[in-house]
Structures are given as C-alpha cells and as structure tokens.
C-alpha cells in the first residue's frame, strides 16, 4: 500500500459551495488573512461504536487536500495542504487521553504533523473529511499488534521526519526542501465549552404542511406555535442562551434563498443552518399522525446506536435514511458517509439519547402525557446537525383529543414547558460535567 492520498471528492463541493460562498462573503471584509488556513484546535473523543477514538482537526477554512501515513505503530503523520496552514495558538483537547505529543512542521503549501500516540493500545489510522467540509477526521480503530504490523507494512514516512524513522522516506514532488520544525507552543487543554446556543426546528412549513389531523388541524401550524413557546421560555428563564429558529413563520426552511427548494433539501438545510449557528443542541419539533384515530402519545427520537448493534451496522444494512414522519426520501448513504457520520458524531450520540430521555420523562411525569418512549430513527434532519440532536413527536393530530390539546394555547404551553425543562436540565448537567473536566489539570 502506498501512502494514502485522500482528496475531497469532486461531488462533495456543490453541496457545500453555497455555504462557503456565504462564509467567504462574511469573512472577507473582517479579515485580510482570509487566504490563510488556520488549524485552530485538535481534539480527541472516544468513538460511540466503541471501536476506538477519533481525532478532529478543527480548520478555520477547508484544506485543499490531506494525506496521512502511519510509518510506525504509535506514530501517525498528517499532512494538510492549503494556501498556508498556521497553528498559532492551537489548542489540544485530548479527551481520549491518547496523544503523547504532536510535532508540527512547516512544509511548502501546507503543514505536517507528527502525532505520537500513547503506547498502551494499537490503533489503525485512517482519515476522512467531516461532511461539513471543513474539519478533518483521523479515525483510530483498535487492532492487534499483529494486524497493525500488516497494515503499516508499506506505509512510508513523510519527509519532514527523516531523522526520526529508519524507514525510507516518501518523495514528495512538491516539496524538495527540508521542512522546518515549528516551535511547539500549543496549549494542552480540557476545553471549557460554553452552552450558549439552542437551535429550535419547527417541522415542515409552507407547502409542506406535515400531518393533517382531526378537523384539518395542520402539523406545521401546531409545531410552529409550540416551538415559539419553547424559545420564549428559554429567552425568559435562560437569558444567557441564544435561541436560533430554523423558521419563524409559515414557510419552508431555505425557501427564502431558493424559492423552489425541495422538501428533502430543506431538511438538509435545517441541519446546515444549525451547524452555521454553532448550536449546542438541535431540537426538531413535530406532531404525529396515524391511520388509527386512537393512536396517541409522545415519542422522542435520536439518531444513534441501536441497542444490540452499532448504528453503523444497522445503517449499513438498511443503507438509507428516511425523512420525518416516515416519508421515505430514498437517500442512499455510501459506506464512507456512514463511517464519517459515526466519526463526526461520536461524543454527541450519547448526549442525544440523554436529552431524548429527559424530554420523555418530562412529558410523562410532569405533563401527564402518554409516553411511547425514546426511539431511534435515521432522520435526514438529524443526520445533518453536527451536535446533540433530537426529534420530538409531541402527540397525534389524528387523535381527536390530542389534536384539540395540541391546537390549544393551554396544551401547547404544557408541551413547550416540558421540552424547555428538559433543555434546562440538560444544560445544567452539561455545565456540571464541564466543571469537572476543567478542574482536572494536565
Ligand atoms: Zn413532522
């Protein structure tokens, strides 16, 4: 095997191009160094499939390409090509506690990094772009010493660390000069991340009316009212938290910039909007429908592990994801998409399940609603939000009693305050765990 060359796939660009144009337009007047690529942070987290860890390279703007190699058992080399990749004030947030040290090298047209792993386990390295197109992910998969030896057999080291390895170096044709080591002045931190933005997503909107219920009650109207009430409670009782709505009126998300946007694309846009807002939580609010009028109760979904098997395996088997309310939107996921989802969302999946459980407890114990439980589903709208994300089904508009309740100011207030309390409790728990992290100094 030769050194792995991983370039951005051409078909990735159209999906992200509009975002990038927007971001470039926003950044251009503020910064004369918009041309520079900055690696702001390196973080590690344990994978939710229990197969190892993922190291994330947080990029201020996307790299042109990247390579990696694993010339020795515990040395992974990473090369990022961009206009000029800088590491000033880089922060290392090694939650997995697997990084021994990192050396950075300045190379022509980019940056090289030698990542030395702790020696207590053996990992196969592999690299992917995050599907948001900006960060780079280094997957570390647990393996045996024997199979690692086989894996790295033909991997050659990048030239910047000639002195460090007895293996022959790989000729890098764009880079004949010997690269200089960069002074390593990075901070090792347990990052204190503030919980300050909640993204509230009222389902459907515009010509996508959602479920049509008893006495022609429309889901899109009911869920917008509930969503605005949740936002109102957050503004009132958690003034330090910023509320971002994916929609605040009766229109399809994304239709303001693209009047012809399709429902499926609108679902994707909701997640992108949440990512751009750098949300700490994504809550999508819906109402249910069933052929049987007696069906009633609440349920909350998260996109994550199946209890018996990993989400990855289930998603591989089914190999598609469906839209809210079981509209099958027929999107096929490639093997690579699935791996990237698992890597990009490790660390969020457990949080999503926790929040979903809190919402259902509130519905059941405080709002006296029938709980149909916490469930898992492959919703497009959750797939695209890179943060803990849940989808709440607040009740059935097809059930006469529940429809009246969901359509009333009283019922909407009860439902909204239950969702609000779950968010508040989640925030408190989150901040408590952050406190414990930050007191642990390295
Ligand atoms: Zn819905």
Image (cartoon, helix red, strand yellow):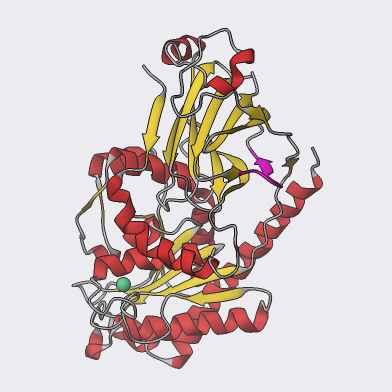
Position above or below: 159 against 293? above
On screen, residue 243 versus residue 237, left or right, reads left
Name the foreground residue: 395 vs 139.
139
Which residue lies at the image location 59% right of the left edge and 82% below the top edge? 233
Which quarter of the rendered picture does the C terminus lie within?
top right
* Residue 307 makes an appearance in the image: no
Residue 219: name its quadrant. bottom left
Residue 305: name its quadrant. top left
Position above or below: 296 against 177? below
Quarter, ligand 1: bottom left
Q: Could you say where residue 66 lies in the image, as x and y percent from the top left? A: 45, 36
Q: Could you say where residue 242 lies in the image, as x and y percent from the top left? A: 60, 75
Name the foreground residue: 169 vs 219.
169
Q: Magenta span has 387?
A: no
Q: Which residues are magenta?
A: 86-95
* Residue 288 makes an appearance in the image: yes
């Amino acid at each position: 095997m030769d050194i792995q060359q991983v370039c951005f796939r051409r078909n990735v660009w159209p999906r992200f191009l509009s975002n990038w144009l927007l971001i470039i337009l926003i950044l251009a007047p503020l910064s004369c160094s918009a041309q520079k690529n900055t690696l702001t942070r390196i973080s590690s987290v344990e994978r939710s499939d229990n197969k190892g860890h993922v190291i994330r390279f947080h990029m201020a703007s996307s790299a042109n390409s990247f390579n990696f190699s694993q010339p020795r058992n515990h040395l992974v080399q990473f090369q990022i090509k961009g206009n000029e990749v800088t590491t000033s004030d880089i922060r290392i947030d090694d939650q997995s506690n697997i990084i021994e040290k990192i050396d950075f090298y300045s190379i022509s047209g980019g940056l090289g990094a030698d990542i030395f792993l702790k020696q207590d386990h053996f990992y196969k390295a592999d690299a992917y772009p995050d599907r948001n197109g900006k960060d780079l992910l280094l997957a570390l998969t647990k393996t045996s010493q024997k199979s690692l030896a086989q894996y790295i057999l033909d991997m050659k080291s990048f030239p910047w660390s000639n002195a460090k390895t007895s293996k022959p170096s790989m000729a890098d044709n764009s880079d004949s000069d010997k690269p200089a080591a960069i002074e390593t002045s990075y901070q090792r931190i347990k990052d204190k991340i503030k919980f300050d933005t909640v993204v509230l997503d009222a389902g459907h909107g515009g010509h996508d009316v959602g479920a049509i219920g008893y006495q022609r009650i429309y889901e899109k109207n009911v869920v917008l009212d509930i969503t605005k009430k949740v936002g109102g409670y957050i503004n009132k009782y958690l003034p330090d938290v910023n509320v971002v709505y994916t929609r605040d009126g009766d229109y399809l998300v994304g239709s303001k910039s693209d009047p012809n946007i399709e429902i499926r694309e609108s679902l994707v846009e909701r997640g992108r909007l949440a990512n751009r807002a750098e949300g700490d939580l994504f809550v999508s609010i819906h109402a249910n429908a069933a052929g049987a009028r007696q069906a009633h109760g609440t349920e909350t979904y998260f996109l994550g592990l199946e209890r018996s098997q990993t989400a990855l395996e289930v998603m591989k088997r089914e190999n598609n994801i469906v839209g809210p309310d079981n509209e099958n939107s027929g999107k096929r996921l490639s093997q690579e998409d699935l791996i990237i989802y698992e890597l990009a969302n490790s660390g969020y999946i457990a949080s999503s399940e926790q929040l979903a459980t809190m919402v259902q407890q509130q519905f059941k114990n405080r709002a006296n609603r029938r709980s149909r439980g916490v469930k898992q589903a492959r919703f497009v709208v959750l797939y695209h939000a890179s943060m803990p994300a849940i989808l709440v089904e607040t009740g059935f508009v097809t059930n006469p009693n529940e429809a009246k309740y969901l359509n009333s100011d009283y019922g909407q207030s009860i439902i909204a305050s239950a969702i609000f309390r779950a968010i508040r409790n989640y925030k408190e728990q989150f901040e408590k765990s952050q406190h414990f992290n930050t007191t642990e100094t390295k």
